[in-house]
């Protein structure tokens, strides 16, 4: 059995995709450095989190999904060194479920890693992420209460640092809960360097070239996606949401438009300030291992002017939708052309289509969360 297991539980939208891309693209190198990342694919950790959180959908899931948590435990049990689990959906676990996870890894010393950021930016980004996962909830109605359901992700249940720490500290002593506070003034690799130091590996010994920022949409683009979600039928599977809505439509077609930034409603901003102060106070008296400055968890006193999602007009949505339709028509033509044998004079265009088709096939095969 590994001697220690680090369980990175998020929070969601705190550089988790960035860190997980580094982890999985350097999995063999981490193993050589004594860090075991169990499983054969990134989604194994997602599926394991669903088992831990007792997601009822797991009962109807394929066996590969249902057995992921057992397979991860078995690999950690047959290995030595340090184990690493990472998925932001672990943050939603109840105190009892967190304790069950620790009990399942009882032969190892379990540590919890929490990446954290100020809650206003977190709240805004999480609403966008909920849209990328098929939600139709307007920003003004988003996360108006704390869910008691550990299968609910896009909610203060996973976004409020204090609430997450309170649940997980029932299972792991605070000195073994490591809170990495994101520094908005630092370079992007700063969080990886501190994460690697916690694991006891040299951060400079790993390839970061495959990592990428998880960029946000503009306000009109976000509202357009929300309305598209209201019309979609048959895109209920996690695969469909991850590949088609999140990656193909949002990340690759709407994000590049670089639209206007926005804030939530004023009372939601005020709630973010209150939760930030509460989290900092809890950390100061809780005995947790904190890396970074606690003031970076506070919402700034002065905010730059930004629009509200509710201010987006039908005309703005129509403009985005028309541009999107034109882009998608080009995509369809490129994909259909890629399947045909090219005439000699049309080969450069067809090759472009073939490259687009290969990229799409690669995305379809790529694990998504």
Image (cartoon, grey):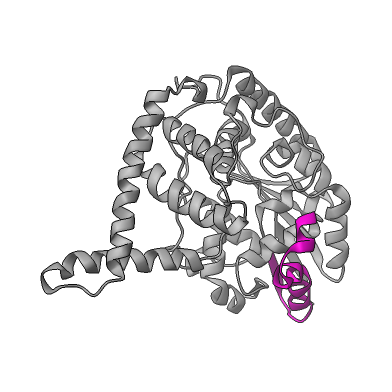
**Which residue is drawn at the image coordinates 61% and 56% (left, top)?**
238
**Residue at 82 percent of width and 56 percent of height:** 54
Q: At 77% from the left edge and 43% from the top edge, which residue is drawn? A: 165
From this view, report whether residue 227 is shown above or below residue 201.
above
Report if residue 83 lies within the magenta region: yes
Where's residue 308, x and y in %?
Answer: 50, 22
Residue 57 vertical placement versus 124 (above, below) = below
| Quarter of the view holding residue 193 | bottom right
Q: Position of residue 99 (x, y in %)?
A: 87, 56
Q: Is residue 333 left or right of residue 3?
A: left
Q: How many marks?
A: 0
User: As drawn, is 102 to the left or to the right of 308?
Assistant: right
Magenta highlight: main SS: helix
Residue beneath the point at 52% across and 63% down: 22
Q: Quadrant of the C terminus?
A: bottom right
Q: Nearer the viewer, residue 164 or 316?
A: 316
Q: Which residues are magenta?
A: 56-85
The residue at the far bottom in this view is 78
Residue 240 x %, y %: 55, 56
Whether residue 183 is visible? no
Q: Quadrant of the N terminus?
A: bottom right
- Residue in front for this viewpoint, 28 or 220: 220
Q: From this viewpoint, which residue is outermost toward the left?
A: 345
Q: Is residue 80 visible in the rendered structure shown here?
A: yes
**Is 326 a magenta residue?**
no
**Depth check: 7 or 63 in front?**
63
Q: Position of residue 239 (x, y in %)?
A: 58, 59
């Amino acid at each position: 059995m590994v001697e220690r297991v680090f369980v990175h539980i998020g929070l969601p939208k705190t550089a988790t995709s960035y860190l997980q891309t580094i982890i999985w693209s350097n999995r063999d190198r981490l193993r050589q450095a004594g860090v075991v990342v169990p499983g054969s694919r990134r989604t194994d950790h997602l599926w394991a989190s669903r088992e831990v959180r007792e997601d009822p959908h797991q009962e109807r899931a394929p066996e590969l999904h249902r057995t992921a948590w057992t397979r991860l435990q078995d690999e950690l049990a047959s290995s030595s060194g340090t184990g690493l689990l990472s998925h932001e959906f672990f943050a939603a676990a109840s105190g009892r479920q967190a304790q069950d996870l620790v009990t399942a890894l009882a032969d190892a010393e379990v540590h919890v890693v929490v990446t954290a950021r100020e809650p206003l930016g977190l709240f805004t980004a999480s609403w966008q992420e909920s849209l990328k996962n098929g939600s139709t909830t307007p920003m003004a109605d988003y996360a108006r209460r704390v869910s008691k359901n550990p299968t609910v992700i896009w909610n203060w249940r996973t976004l409020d640092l204090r609430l997450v720490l309170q649940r997980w500290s029932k299972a792991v002593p605070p000195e073994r809960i490591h809170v990495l506070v994101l520094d908005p003034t630092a370079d992007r690799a700063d969080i990886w360097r501190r994460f690697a130091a916690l694991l006891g590996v040299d951060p400079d010994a790993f390839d970061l070239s495959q990592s990428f920022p998880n960029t946000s949409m503009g306000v009109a683009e976000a509202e357009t996606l929300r309305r598209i979600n209201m019309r979609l039928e048959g895109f209920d599977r996690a695969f469909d949401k991850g590949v088609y809505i999140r990656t193909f439509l949002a990340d690759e077609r709407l994000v590049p438009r670089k639209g206007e930034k926005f804030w939530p409603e004023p009372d939601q901003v005020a709630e973010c300030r209150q939760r930030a102060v509460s989290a900092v106070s809890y950390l100061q008296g809780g005995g947790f291992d904190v890396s970074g400055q606690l003031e970076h968890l506070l919402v700034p006193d002065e905010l730059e002017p930004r629009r509200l999602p509710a201010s987006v007009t039908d005309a703005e949505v129509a403009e985005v939708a028309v541009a999107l339709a034109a882009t998608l028509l080009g995509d369809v033509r490129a994909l259909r052309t890629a399947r045909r044998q090219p005439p000699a004079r049309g080969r450069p265009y067809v090759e472009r289509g073939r490259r687009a088709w290969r990229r799409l096939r690669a995305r379809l095969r790529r694990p998504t969360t």
